[in-house]
Amino acid sequence: MRFGLSSPTVVMRVRLVGWCGLILCLAPISLLASSPAGAVAGYGDVAEDRYYTEPVQWSVDNDITDISGNCFAPDAPVSRGETAVYFWNAEGQPSAAAHSFRDIRVQAQDDAVSWMAAAGITTGTSQTTFSPDKTLTRAELAAFLYRLAGQPTTGAHPFDDVFRGWQHAPVAWLATTGITTGTSPTTFSPNKTLTRADLLTFLYRYQG
């Protein structure tokens, strides 16, 4: 089993159940009896016509995600620790030497972050911290994927809102490989918080 987001990742489960619980509380009673028509992978909030539909189905089919309940919460933000586990699961849970960060408390995240650090995908937020509960931005996700790919040579990107030096090569690579088309033809929104739907879409396109 490649699930790394189940127990003991209790905090994550509770938080996501909270999102789903809010949705279910607001829904008419008639909708609670079954998932909506066209629901994907058992999730009542993933319709067949969304940009993230195939990525979500792919993640379930390949044991990359394991979220209990009837809700995927595609718009929920993703933390750095959760992202590490998704990456680790997608790559087959490779083993690695222990990391040097002092703020990892969840076993699945511990293994995932060890691999990311050993592979050069992350250097943490400091020499001793990874900040697993901090949300991830679109630019930070681009950097993770770019390092995972081996930091290949790339051209320019078409986005007007990518200014910081470390963002240019990762975002350009995402654009030239078709992993992203941006949030518009001229914007990437690098500082926007990454959502669960976006993360799985990026991973799906990278793996494809």
Image: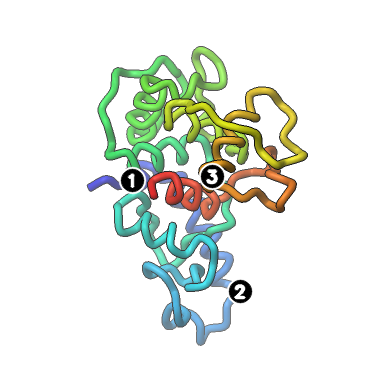
Residue 185, horizontal then vertical, whole percent: 71, 51
In the image, which is nearer the foreground, mark 3 or mark 1?
3
Q: CA distance from mark 2 to mark 1?
A: 27 Å
Residue at numbered disc 2: 26
Amino acid identity at mark 1: Ser
Residues 19 and 48: in front is: 48
Q: Residue furthest right?
A: 160
Q: Secondary structure at mark 1?
A: loop
Residue at numbered disc 3: 78
Residue 134 visible here? no
46 in relation to 128, above or below? below
Amino acid identity at mark 2: Leu
Q: Which mark is residue 7?
A: 1
133 in relation to 15, above or below? above
Q: Are marks 3 and 2 in contact (CB under 8 Å)?
A: no
Q: CA distance from mark 3 to mark 2?
A: 23 Å
Mark sitting earlier along the chain (3/2):
2
User: Crowdedness of circle 1 by 10 Å Cα count: few (<14), some, many (20+)?
Assistant: few
Q: Residue at x 38, y 46 (%)?
A: 207
Residues 11 and 169: in front is: 169
Residue 54, horizontal then vertical, whole percent: 43, 62
Horizontal side of residue 115 vs 84, given as left or right:
left
Residues 62 and 21: in front is: 62
Mark sitting earlier along the chain (2/1):
1
Q: Which mark is residue 175?
A: none
User: Crowdedness of circle 3 by 10 Å Cα count: few (<14), some, many (20+)?
Assistant: many
Amino acid identity at mark 3: Val
Q: CA distance from mark 3 to mark 1?
A: 17 Å
Residue 74 visible here? yes
In the image, which is nearer the foreground, mark 3 or mark 2?
3
Residues 183 and 104: in front is: 183
